[in-house]
Each structure stands twice: as structure tokens, then as C-alpha cells.
Amino acid sequence: MFHNKLNAIIILLLFISCESITYDKDSLELEDLEINSFSAIYENQNNIISIFLELTNYIDVQNINVLVTTNGNIYEGDIILSDYLNISNFNSNVYTYEGFIELSEDIYIYDIALVFEFENQENIYFLDTFTTPIRPNIDELILPSIFELDSTLWSTLPIELVISNMNGLNNIESVSYQVKRFYEGCQTDCEINENCNNPINDDEYISDSTWILDHLFSDNNNQIHNFIVDIPMRPIDGSALFDENNNEIFEATDCGRVGLVLLKFIVVDKDGLINEVYDIPIEIVAP
């Protein structure tokens, strides 16, 4: 969605033959055609486009035709929508449109033109673009293939994701991870859990609401966004984890487990589009 206030003097373009338009100042003063507000919103769940136009002053326009094209050129692109805006019943300066249009998830920017059609003069064109929801993509994973536990101290497993999202950082709803564990049993006497010597083999990925990655930094020119997480890893001796005020965060267990863990990473944007990668292996080993 975008809003702007533009004078028509900067958009007097001839749609046919790409020649300069002939503008009759006596029939319509330039300042009489001033756009106070304009927005085009595409809702990808139901493939609906909503257009809103408010003119500063009333003008005697016959029709306002809306054109949406692909290929980045209003003159040469494929026309995928051609229809007319509807004048509001409550405000003669307001025009709206809502209709079905199926847009590709692979095209980010579409061209849109409003064609002001007058009875006794050349058409006037307002040209702009609007953006559509694009699925985010996990471009790169930065993490070790092997992680060594400490004997007695808690450590952290660092993970960084590089995500591209052409709709911007604010469009990213969440970045999370899930795990599937294939751990060996503890090689010690079971004092806390009588089944500690049994292996752990998860049938499905498990998750927790706190397993999220935090935003680190962004390259806004290219819409590349880095997210990180430091996963706490239990030491071999199974020690509990305490915060700086000596409050217990994780209680003690019989051991810190070793074996294979598979990770899944999920990016969800505010348009409901999802990208995920899974079965990313890390071997957890003893020192």
C-alpha cells in the first residue's frame, strides 16, 4: 500500500504510440487534477485487489480506467486487469475498486495506471507501482555440523539464518526452529531419571513457543535479514542451569546427551506465506 499526493503535471503521458500528450490548459487547469490519496492493496489469500483514489477537488471526468500490467512496463507489459473505478455514493471526490485478480508469487512489483478519460480532451495518465506479497526465503544457514559439549559447564550452540524477504523486515512475523533428537542413553548410573540409559528417538519434530530467532541486522537495499539464536547446551555431567540471581532455569538431569539432532527452521510472514528448511543435521559429541 502506498499513499501520495502528486500533481498531474508530472504524469501527462500518452498511452497510445508513446508520444507526448497534447494538454489543453484552457479546458482543465493542472491544479484541478490533484490526487490527495491513492492506494492499491493486493490480498493474496483470496486474490482480491482493492483500489482507493481521492481527488482534492471535483473534476468532470467521464471515466477512470484502471490498468494493471506485468513485465515492468505499462506500455509493453501484459495487461492482466482493465476495469473502471466506481465513484463513491457519499463523496464525489472518492473512487474505489475491488475485484478478483490472480497475481504471481514470483513477481514482486506490478505497474498500475489510472486513465482519466475526458469528453473533450486527451486522456491523462497517472502511473505508479504496487507491491504484492512475496514468499520469504531462507538463503543461508550458518551453523556447525559438529558441536562438542563441555564436561561441566553449560555452553551455547550458535545458529544464524540469512533470510531474503522483498516485502521488508516488518513483514516477517516469526522465525523459529524445531528439533528431532536421536540421542544415546546416559553412560552413568540413573539417579534422577530411572530410564536415563534409554536412547531418545523422536518420531516427529518437537517445538516450544520460546524457540525463536532474534533479528540481528538487515541489508535493506537488498532486503536481506539476518536472525540468530544461541541454544543452551547441557554439559556432560547433567548440571542444572541458573541465572545471574541463582534462579534455576533448567533442572539437573543424569547427563548431557550426545548423538544426532535434526533441525527445522520456519519463517512466517504477515501475509501467511511460509518458507521452511528441515532435516539439517548436527552431531552432538562428548569432549
Image (spheres, rainbow, N blue to C red):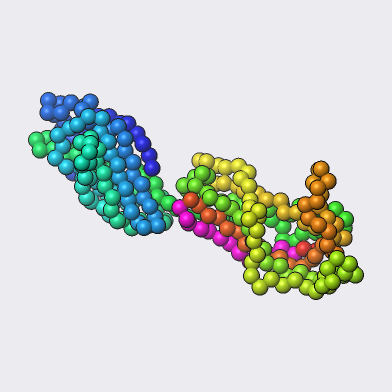
Quarter holding the N terminus is: top left
Q: How many marks?
A: 0
Residue 272, percent from left and from top: 47, 55
Residue at x 63% of width, y 55% of height:
209
Residue at x 28% of width, y 53% of height:
99
Q: Magenta-highlighted stretch: main secondary structure?
A: strand
Q: Relative to 95, is 77 above or below? A: below
Span shown in magenta = 271-283
Left or right, residue 283 beside residue 218: right
Taking the magenta stretch, the answer to whether it contains residue 266 is: no
Residue at x 58% of width, y 62% of height:
277
Residue 270, percent from left and from top: 48, 51
Regarding residue 242, the answer to whether it shows in the image is yes
Left or right, residue 54 beside residue 169: left
Report the front residue among 104 and 254: 254
Regarding residue 18, the answer to whether it shows in the image is no
Quarter holding the C terminus is: bottom right
Q: Relative to 23, is 49 above or below? A: below
Furthest toward the right, the residue is 189
Report the front residue among 286 and 56: 56
Taking the magenta stretch, the answer to whether it contains residue 274 is: yes
Residue 255, percent from left and from top: 84, 64
Residue at x 71% of width, y 63% of height:
282
Residue 137, percent from left and from top: 53, 55
Left or right, residue 244 beside residue 119: right
